[in-house]
Structure formats: C-alpha cells, structure tokens
Image (cartoon, grey):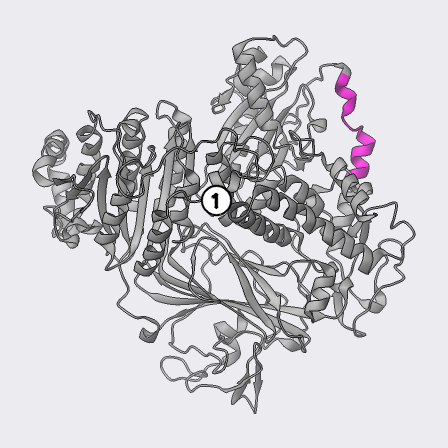
Amino acid sequence: MSHHKRRVYPQVQVPYATSVPVVAEQQQVQQQIDQTAYTMGNVQLNDNAYSFTQPMSNNQYPAAGKVVNQLYPVDLFTELPPPIRDLSLPPPPIIISQDNIVTPSESINVPCQYFRSTLNTVPKTSSLLKKTKLPFGIVIKPYLHLQDSENQVPLNTDGVIVRCRRCRSYMNPFVTFINQGRKWQCNICRFKNDVPFGFDQNLQGAPINRYERNEIKNSVVEYLAPVEYSIREPPPSVYVFVLDVSQNTIKNGLLATSARTILENLEFLPNHDGRTRVSIICVDHSLHYFYVPLDDDYEESDDEESDEDNGEEDEDDSSEEDEEDDCSETVQMFDIGDLDEPFLPMPSDELVVPLKYCRKNLEKLLKKIPEIFQDTRSSGFALGPALEAASSLIKGTGGKVEVISSTLPNTGTGKLKKRNEQGVLNTAKESSQLLSCNDSFYKTFTIECSKLQITVDMFLASEEYMDVATLSHLGRFSGGQTHFYPGFNATSLNDVTKFTRELSRHLSMDISMETVMRVRGSTGLRATSFFGHFFNRSSDLCAFSTMPRDQSYLFGISIEDSLTTEYCYLQVSTLLTLNTGERRIRVMTLALPTTESARDVFASADQLAITDFITQNAVSKALNSSMHSARDFITKSLQDILIAYKKEISMSNVNSVTSLNLCANLRMLPLLMNALSKHIAFRSGVVPSDYRASALNKLETEPLHYLIKSIYPTVYSLHDIPDEVGLPNVKGKTVLPEPINATISLFERYGLYLIDNSAELFLWVGGDAVPELLRDVFSIDTISNIPVGKSELPLLNDSPFNERLRNIISNVRENNDTITFPSLYIIRGPSINEPANITSEREMASLRLWASSTLVEDKVLNCASYREYLQSMKTTINR
C-alpha cells in the first residue's frame, strides 16, 4: 500500500477523544502563530511604527529617525497553547547603521550560530540594565561542525595582523579609517592607530584594495599566526587510551566493544600533518603498558604497496591469522603492579608511537587486547595511577587522554567509594554530599593537566554506580567531556550502536591544541563570569588544553561604566594550534546598538540566549550551592523579568493587573523556564545522583539549539504526515513534519508520535492504534506485539510509510555538529482493554512515565503544568 499519497488512519472512537482541540481552534492558533512570526521580524522607523496591539502610553522613544526593533506586547494567557514555532525563529535583528561599517553589508555582523548576545540592544548604563532585570551575556560556539573542512571561514595568510596598540583588539568591519586612510580608529577603545605597512599590498608587493581584505568584509575571520604567537614548535596530536580491563568491563562487553571501535577509527583520527601519536594503557589493579614497534613496511612507497597487494593478495588473506598470533612477538606488554611508586617501563617516546608508522601493529594489538584480558579475575580499577601515568607519558607534548571504563575507581590514588544516597536525595544535602567532588585528587589533577596541555575525556558505561559527579571534574576543567551510558551491555545491539557511533564521532572530530580564548569589550564592558569546560586562567583568559568542536561557551558581561557611543562591541579571539601544525587566530566581532530606553532593551532581547544564561547559572548553583538555590534562581529570574516589564513597560495599560504581559520576542521564556524546572538536572524528587550529575554536566557545554531541545523537546505527529514529509526535498534532505506542542492533550489514542529531547528519541504508539498503522510501521496486527523499550524500527521493503518514518528518524539522528546518537525507545500508550498487574505492564508504565516527563507543558511529577505556572507567576507579580 503506497504512502506517497497522504493517508489518514481511521480514528478509534473513544470517550476521551474530545480532549483534543477542534479543527477550528487549531486553525485559529496556527493563524496566530503565523501572524506573530511575521510581525516579530518587522523593523521599522519609530515615527512610522505599526501598532501591533493597543498603543502604549508610556513608550520611551529613542532619537528621531534611529531604526529600532518594535516592541509588541502580548498577554501570555491568550497565547495558550504557546506558539512553539517561535523557538525556531532567529533572534531579534541587530540593527547597525550602514554608516558605522567600513564596507556596508546587511550581513556584516557575526552570524548568531557563532556568537549570540542575550541583548541585541544594550543599555547604556548599569542602572538601566538592573531595571530591566534582563541578563547580559554572550553565547559562543567557535566551530559549527565536527570537521573543520566544513563551513570554513575566510583565512588571512599574508602575515599582516593589525591590532590596536592600546586594547590589543583586532581590526574588524566596524573600525574607522581617518587621516586619508593613514590611521584607523579602534571601535573597541577609540584609540587612533597607524595603518601598518603592507596592509594595502599582497605578498608579492602589488597594491590591493584594503576594502576587499577579509578582516574588513567579515566579522568572523582567521589569521595564520606568525612565530611570535607560539612559545614552542606546534605539538602533534596525541591520544592516550586508558582502557579499563577489570572483570566488570569484560563481563558487560565494554572492552571488546571499545577496542574494536578504536581499531576501526585509527584511520579517522585527526592526522592531517602525519604526526599524530597514540598510546594504550590497560588498567585493572595494575597498569599494563604496551610497546608497539614500527610496521615492517612503513618505508615502502605507495607503488610498492600496490604491487604487493596485487601479487600477494591470497597470501595476505591466508596469513592474517598468523599475523594476529604473531602479535605477542611484535608487541610487548609491561605490567606495573607498584601503584605507590609507579614508573614508566620505557622512555615515553617508545610508548607513545606515531600512528602513521605503527598503525598495522596498533591494529594487531587492539584485536588481541580482549583476548589478553578475557580471563581476568581482577575487580580493581586504578584510575588515579593510570591518569598520572598518562600525564607522565605526554607531559612534553600535551594531548588527549581517553578513559573508557565501567568500574568505579577503587584502587590506588583517587579511589572512590559508593556514596550513600538513601535519605540524601531530594534534600538540602543533595548537592554537597552527592554532586560534589568526592576526592581532591580529581581537582588537583585537572589543574596540573591545564599546565601540561592535557585534556581528559571520560566514557563511563555501566549498570553500577560510577560517581559521575566526581569523575566529570576531569573533563570540566581540562576542556574535555564526560559521556555516561547507564545500563550498558554489549548483548544489546542498541547499546553497542549508540556507544560505537558516539565514540567514533568523538575520535574523528577535529581538535585544536594549546588554545586560549579572550573576550574584549567596548570601554565600560567587561566579561565577569565564564561558563563551559575550560580552565579560567585569569580574569578574562580561558585556557583549553584541547578545544573540541561540539561544545558551546557562555560569558556574562557587566556594564561597569556608562556607554557613551551609539554602538558597543564585543570581540572574541581564539589562539589555537590545528592538527595541520598551523597556529591560527580566530576572531569574531559583534556590534550592538546602545539605548537609554528600557523598551528598546526588551524589544531586542533574545529569549533563547537568555535561557542559556539562566541555565548555566542554575547549573553552577546546583553544583556549588544547593538544588533548592538552583530551582529558586530559575523561578526568581523569570519573576524579576515579568515584574520589571510590568513596571517599566505596561504599568499604565488597563489590563496590566488581570493579564500577564510580556513582549512577543520573549513570550517563549516562561515556557522554557517552566520546562527547565522539570529537566532531570533540576526537578525535585528522587533522581539517582549519576543521572543528575550527567545531566548537569551535559547542560554546561550543550550548543544552544540542542540545549533548547533538551529543555523543550520537539514532538512530531507521524500518523497524519503530509505527502512530502519523510521524503527528500530538492536538496536531498529529508523533509520533517511541523512540530506540535509537548502536551499529552494533543496525543490521539490511535496516533503515532516521535519525541526528540536531543539525548533520546521516544516513539509513542497509541494504545488504540488501528491494525493498518501497525502493519505499515511494524508488520504486525496486534498492539501488544510491538517491540517496546530500546529498539529500532524494522526495515519493511514493502511499506513506503515505514521507509518515510525511518528517514525521519535518521534525519533527526544524523548531525554534523554533535557526537550524540540518540537511542530510540518504543512505547505503547495506554488502552481501554489494557491488562493490569502484569510485570511487563508495570515496566511499560515506567517507560510511559519517562516519556511523559518530556511532555513539559503538562504537570510532570510534582512540577506545575504551564498554565498553572503562568497563574502562579501572575499571582506573584500582582501582589
């Protein structure tokens, strides 16, 4: 049966089907969404402003003729259900006069994917900022993709790097040329600098048009840095794999899975300059080093290798087993049992080997490691000594330490004990006793890692307690990350698929070494708070031993002196070493208009960036203070903004007491704050500490669009998709359905829905789904036979509808800017004739509760529904 034609499955008549909004109401809501999406983008002159609603008597207008974003007030109660299409809209436009740009262009400002401000119009004084109660910060994502070859930015290779002599900012599109072009005035500090010799010439000395230079035409640009920007020769990329080989890791199959994954990805490790080096340390109650010699034929030319392959193909195939058996003769293993005074059995340069020349022998070793340790009886895992050994190996170069484990460190330095969660979860002591670092070694070691340019990444996969709260400190301050796979077992294909996909993406991701990032702002602006995984070396310098491509950072900005100009500027510069061996500087410059009007500040506020700002501060409070202070911060931040808006903007409006008003560009903020309070990182109730710590850790670095999705999941209705959905468009990309609101009230009992919270996918099959739908999706006729739990959709060659659904799921999963591969959970919704008191049904109830917790507009556990939340806010601000 073809589903290229739209098919609407018949509705099963049930008494509660009337809970779904009628068609007329849905159309009315859609029209309202469309109208607001259009008007929010309008930019008009003040004296010709279009009146979106009733005129506001206390409008504060800026200087005549200045172009500003218009403020459109809305009553949040009339915006129910909330128009979630707003979540995919761009932020309010940053309006810069063309006279303020060296080379006028509408797209001259930095793209928001790289650099995003919570306020796209900045108050001129700190007192005005305090009045609005809006936070001022910037969201930074230096790289948009896992591979640097994608979306490359303009690169200057002529060696001419023009910087202000006073503030050291870089030339950018917003400077001013003066004195017939012989000088330039810095837009950051207003200092007048000489234009250097060579600025108007190319490498051959021929004259060029300065207005065509990359730094003048682009707000994101890179420079090839000269030698004075380096303190030593660019180091190679170095990977030290620390593999847990204790009994638990053998039993759940993690060792075999990780060894095979590393082997398959050796060719994809960043090795652009051919200098990448690799070492492997296996760890149980002892440390096991490996000497890997050079491959026998590494000196042969490509032609010789080709001839050998053609002439001896059969011989190579037949001798593959002999080569593996010969591994013990070519690779040597050294066991170090003295953990109190561990030592390197060989010089470090013989244990950390060049990938280019040792790849074949590394592959042999990785094939043999599961066999070597398959009969181990050791339950120990000496992580602390292993980390110290790894740092000793690469202290001269720096690099990445990749720890893969399923055992709580229990031997030697840094050994941990399972914390007693009973009676502590969901209490005032939860943060201090369960979410804090449980051993000072992990704090002091990360400081040492920063000095040695070493990053630690953790891959923790176990059914047991792992103390994620403690181990995540290793990545938090070294530029790394902690990845958590609870309940991992290699007998589950889905567990193996997720782990191998994510580890593979992680290993193939480009990185930067010896990286520092600095924020500079106009006179009066200063970065005062820093969030993300790095080491804050000084008041404005963030150090990354290595910088990954899948993390985001947020900096809080304070207004310390009044801004006297019509525009202010923020510039983020990142000095780094690529895997190619090149030292580069990436510069991103953001121009923002300033104002003395609270109205302008509100009209240009970015609700998604503000959500990130509040989230990062709440994470910090959860880790350093208490869960209560984190939840209170989320609630109070929104309350303060609503009160300030009422006082500064809408106090004189007739309905200001009976309504709950906010500007249209911020109307998703209350929804996001309500949803954030229900996130596993913050919600009250009993949440195992490993899960809570992992969620907090992930929020710290998640890029903005994934962070928003983890707070407010994307929900798709699949049983009624239009004809084009699930099929490729003209660009070859699968068309996705329009999202619906995250509420169970929109779920039909016979429907099919996909929930995407960026970490997991839930496929919700209505308990009264008709046999036609079940056959087309699963090739079964009875709802009780669907494969519930962690699973995948079957491949049905005779069902085009099944193919379209798999295309949709594949499109959601496959992204080139994150390593995350969401697992799919299939859930059967409740039915009228559902059996009771059966173990499988109780398990299904648990799955439903988990999936339902992502429907954040509803009441989740003891957290209020969105409507209740708004009512509570209204009551609070009208007191």
Q: Which residue lies furthest to the right in this view?
A: 654
Specify start and end residues of the magenta stretch as a single range: 16-29
Residue 133's quadrant in the figure?
bottom right
The structure residue drawn at horizontal position 52% and vertical position 88%, both measured from the top left corner, is: 183
Task: Give the residue at mark 1.
Answer: 697
The structure residue drawn at horizontal position 76% and vertical position 36%, both measured from the top left corner, is: 867
Q: Label 1: state its secondary structure.
A: helix
Residue 373's quadrant in the figure?
top left
Above or below 124: residue 687: above
Q: Whole-percent x and y of residue 703?
A: 52, 49
Give yes or no for residue 394 being in the magenta stretch: no
| Residue sitting nearer the eye, 552 or 158 | 552
Q: In the shown orientation, is residue 154 left or right of residue 39?
A: left
Q: In the shown orientation, is residue 650 left or right of residue 128?
A: right
Please indicate, yes or no, whether residue 766 appears anywhere in the rendered image.
yes
Pick the quarter of the image with the N terminus.
top right
Q: Whole-percent x and y of residue 189?
A: 56, 79
Q: Is the magenta stretch mostly helix, strand or loop?
A: helix
| Residue sitting nearer the eye, 426 or 784 | 426
